[in-house]
Amino acid sequence: MRLNPFNTDNIQVGTTGGGRRMPGGRGGGIGCGTIVIAAIAYFVFGADPFQTAATIGGMQDGSAPQQQTAGSNENEQAICDSNAYAAETCSALDSLNQTWAQVFAEQGVQFQQPTLKFATSQRFNTACGPGSVNMGPFYCPGDQTIYIDVGFYDQLAQMAGDRGDFARLYVVAHEYGHHIQTITGIAQQIRSAQQQNPRASNQLQVLMELQADCYAGVWAGKNRNLIEAGDVEEGMRAASSIGDDTLQRRAGQRVNPEGFTHGTSEQRMQALRLGIQGNDRQCDEITALR
């Protein structure tokens, strides 16, 4: 995907501190061989790299999201220029900000940008509780921040034969989708519905994850002029690779729908495709809570 270079005037970027240098970023891509790392993170660390339990944890306390303060342009420039992966992620964030700001403006709704923080420490604090690089990329609604360790991209690059970039961008766009759910109130509505009907908690969580996939597709669909040949196919393969049923099979487990949290491979592909082909209002219908 031909992303335009990031503009520090349109992004809020920081680090988690701790002095750890961001690894990786040799400029190579990762593709759809991500399933191995995804399965490791999901079943060993108890967290899905594409959305961790921090999202639910941030909603449990009922606290209002806290908007982050942007850093200086000089600091943001230095952070984004740390390596190729960081620069690519910052460019994706800039594009996502522009795309969603326009969507909200067309609907006459106020828009708030999220903050992106690169993990530069093994463990760090978030408004949703302790964070760890082992959790993979995740979004915390408590501080409206997307947390990413670019070392995760490097590990995936070593595991994958496909050097495409769309899987990485899908990660960022999916987490950004959770930000959209937070500022529109969808996330809190889902949490309230889960509290009222605990038996449906997993099904409701699946709907929220599928909607985030759909929102990721909306961003891609609204930037068709930047999409290159093979990008959509990369996205479809990536979505298929991280379906709950596929992850369970790869982990040697039987497929257990009651344990689903993100949807089947087919559902995730359908949600991403819906977003690419449609618009955000069609994505809204996935949760049917707005």
Image: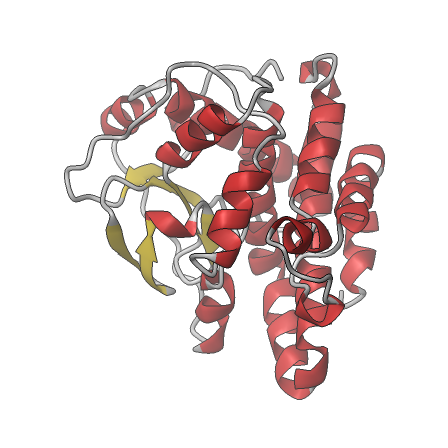
- Quarter in which the N terminus is drawn: top right
| Image-quadrant location for residue 126 | bottom left
| Image-quadrant location for residue 194 | bottom right
Residue 30 placed where, x, y %?
Answer: 53, 24
Q: Is residue 153 left or right of residue 231?
A: left
| In-front residue for pair 20/177 | 20
Q: Does 37 appear above or below 209?
A: above
| In-front residue for pair 79/94 | 79
Instruction: Report if residue 238 is visible in the image.
Output: yes
Instruction: Report if residue 222 is visible in the image.
Output: no
Residue 273 placed where, x, y %?
Answer: 81, 37
In the rendered image, the residue lying farthest to the front is 252
| In-front residue for pair 10/6 | 6
- Quarter in which the C terminus is drawn: bottom right
Q: Identify which residue is drawn at 36% across, 33% down.
A: 151
Q: Is residue 14 left or right of residue 270?
A: left
| Image-quadrant location for residue 17 | top left
Q: Identify which residue is drawn at 22% across, 44% down.
A: 121
Q: How is the image coloured?
A: secondary structure
Q: Identify which residue is drawn at 26% across, 45% down.
A: 16
Q: Does 86 appear above or below 147?
A: above
In the rendered image, the residue lying farthest to the bottom is 196
Residue 283 placed where, x, y %?
Answer: 78, 50
Q: Identify which residue is drawn at 60% across, 65% down.
A: 187
Q: Does 120 appear above or below 92?
A: below
